[in-house]
Image (spheres, rainbow, N blue to C red):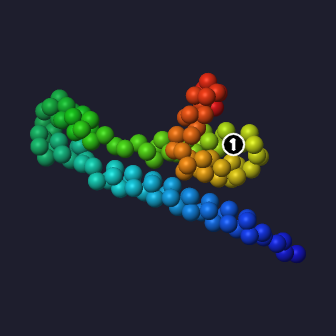
Amino acid sequence: MKTKVSSSNVRQHNRFNREVRKLNKMIAEVARKRLSQPNPFAVCTASVGRKDKAKYERCVLQVKSQSRPDLLSKEMRNQIRVGTKVEMEHTKDKRKARKIAIQHLIEHPDYYTKLAKCFGGKH
């Protein structure tokens, strides 16, 4: 027995898929940025060598501090995790909760941070 799928459900599903693709593009862009940053160990091995351990370690720390990685993907994953927990208050389906959380984050990337501030860190 086949069930009818309403056109509004199909539109919602398509919109959700577009939103997930946007989020995946954002995460992929951050990954590209991370890969384009210099490897501090290779830079310091080439410039100061490894014989003087203290000098080498200072060099590595300096190169790392100059090229801090963008933490968007880690933050976004954390926001999705927190958002899924919050949205589980409204549904028992984890997939639906994640979908709602992603929709909120696409509109406002810091939605759940602001929500936590409003409720005094409850979430």
Residue 87 percent location from the top left of the image: 69, 42
Helix, strand or loop at label 1? It is helix
96 in relation to 52, above or below:
below
Amino acid at the residue labelled 1: Glu
Left or right: 60 in relation to 72: left
Tell me which corner region of the image, top left, top right, bottom left or bottom right, holds residue 84. Answer: top right
**Where the N terminus falls, by quadrant?**
bottom right
Q: Name the residue under label 1.
A: 87
**Where the C terminus falls, by quadrant?**
top right
Pick the residue in front: 63 or 22: 22
Q: Is residue 54 visible?
A: yes
**Residue for point 78% across, 69% down:** 6
Q: Residue furthest right?
A: 1
Left or right: 33 in relation to 62: right
**Residue for point 43% across, 57% down:** 28
Residue 48 percent location from the top left of the image: 11, 39
Pick the residue in front: 98 or 37: 98
Left or right: 112 in relation to 90: left
11 in relation to 2, above or below:
above
Q: Is the residue marked by circle 1 packed among few (<14), some (14-19), or many (20+) residues within 10 Å?
A: some
**Residue for point 52% across, 61% down:** 21
Q: Is residue 60 visible?
A: no
Tell me which corner region of the image, top left, top right, bottom left or bottom right, holds residue 45. Answer: top left
Circle count: 1
Residue 121 percent location from the top left of the image: 60, 26
